[in-house]
């Protein structure tokens, strides 16, 4: 990713954010200093690690009482301020002897960056054909694949990477899998809706928290359909909504809203209540891949 001080990055940010790019870039630079308290997920013992993309500690704290599998919401300082950075620090620079014993089920669009790492199993959900117009795998697809891998693969540990509560926001009905994407929340459109006075910052925050509820409903389903004594629910990085002029999330930035992530310990038992659906694989064109990245705010 282009560095914060490069001319091309400054031009790109000015095009996207207008005058707000100036304090944004300045704040990113100020918050570049390393934090010695960074903790890798490998420093802890777990059988199942559930990663919720872009989840903040305060969001998890707000909804914790709504879910019986969430007790204390602790926190750690993430190794990444962005998914690419987290993937590199966790897997590329991580302990090979642990990675080789791990299955990784991931809907993150940057998972191809670590495709050559020695996972016991790597399940890239971006290659699946699911009947939903979404730039990333909906939560139920991630859950289905995680259940299937959990039941079929003989591995020491599993990491399941959901793409929510990361934008775009998912609208859903009563039936599992009845989901659609809120168009206004794609890319950076939701921030411009706030800048233009169409949405309040409280509405942006509530959108992310509702997206967190959406994915946690499926996490509950996963915890009832997989065997794991030691389960941790965490995030790859946090998310900024205007704090210190910062927006979204970015590699190298050390501000607490981007680095402090939840750490929730729980357990899982396979009651066999879900028979996971099967999905065909699909070859996506470069244009389609770019469109999906743009809808996530990465282009």
Image (spheres, helix red, strand yellow):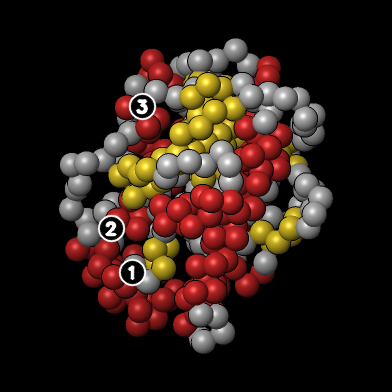
Residue 86 drawn at (x, y percent): 39, 41
Element carrying mark 2: loop
Closest to the camera, between mark 3 and mark 1, is 3
Cβ atoms at labels 3 and 1 below 8 Å apart: no
Picture quadrant of residue 69: top right
Kind of element beneath mark 1: helix
Q: Earlier in the sequence, mark 1 or mark 2?
A: 1
Up-down relation of residue 231 to residue 9 (above or below): above
Label 3 to label 1, Cα distance in Å? 30 Å
Q: Nearer the viewer, residue 125 or 291?
A: 125
Q: Quadrant of residue 210?
A: bottom right
Residue drawn at x 43%, y 42% is: 72
Is residue 160 shown left or right of residue 125? left
Residue in view at x 51 percent, y 50 percent: 64
Residue marked by disc 3 = 44
Which residue is identified by label 2? 255
Q: Secondary structure at mark 3?
A: loop
Residue 84 visible? The answer is no
Query: Residue drawn at (68%, 17%), measured in percent from left and top?
Result: 152
Q: Position of residue 280 (x, y in %)?
A: 78, 35
Kindly check if marks 1 and 2 are in contact, taking CB atoms under 8 A apart as contact: yes
Mark 3 vs mark 2: in front: 3
Determine whether 283 is above or below 204 in the image: above
In-front residue for pair 112/176: 176
Count of picture labels: 3
How far apart are labels 3 and 2 at the CA level?
23 Å
- Relative side of 199 to 145, left or right: left
| Residue linked to disc 1 | 243
Instruction: Give the answer, above or below, for where 24 lies relative to 162.
Output: below
Identify the residue shown where x is 81% and y is 50%: 175
């Amino acid at each position: 990713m282009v560095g914060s001080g490069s001319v091309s990055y400054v031009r790109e940010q000015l095009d996207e954010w207008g005058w707000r790019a100036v304090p944004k870039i300045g704040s990113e630079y100020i918050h570049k200093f390393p934090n010695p308290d960074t903790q890798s997920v490998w420093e802890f013992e777990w059988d199942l690690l559930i990663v919720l993309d872009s989840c903040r500690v305060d969001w998890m704290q707000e909804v914790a009482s709504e879910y019986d599998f969430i007790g204390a919401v602790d926190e750690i300082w993430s190794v990444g301020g962005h998914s690419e950075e987290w993937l590199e620090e966790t897997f590329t620079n991580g302990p090979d002897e642990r990675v080789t014993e791990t299955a990784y089920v991931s809907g993150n669009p940057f998972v191809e960056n670590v495709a050559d790492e020695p996972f016991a199993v790597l399940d890239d959900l971006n290659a699946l054909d699911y009947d939903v117009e979404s730039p990333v795998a909906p939560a139920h697809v991630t859950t289905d694949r995680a259940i299937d891998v959990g039941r079929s693969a003989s591995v020491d540990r599993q990491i399941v990477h959901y793409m929510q509560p990361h934008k775009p926001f998912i609208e859903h009905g009563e039936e599992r899998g009845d989901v659609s994407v809120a168009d206004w929340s794609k890319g950076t459109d939701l921030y411009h809706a706030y800048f233009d006075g169409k949405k309040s910052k409280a509405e942006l925050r509530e959108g992310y928290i509702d997206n967190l509820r959406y994915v946690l409903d499926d996490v509950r389903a996963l915890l009832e359909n997989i065997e794991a004594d030691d389960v941790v629910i965490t995030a790859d990085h946090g998310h900024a909504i205007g704090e210190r002029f910062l927006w979204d999330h970015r590699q190298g930035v050390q501000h607490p809203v981007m680095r402090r992530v939840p750490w929730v310990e729980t357990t899982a038992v396979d009651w066999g209540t879900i028979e996971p659906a099967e999905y065909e694989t699909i070859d996506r064109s470069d244009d389609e891949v770019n469109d999906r990245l743009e809808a996530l705010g990465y282009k």
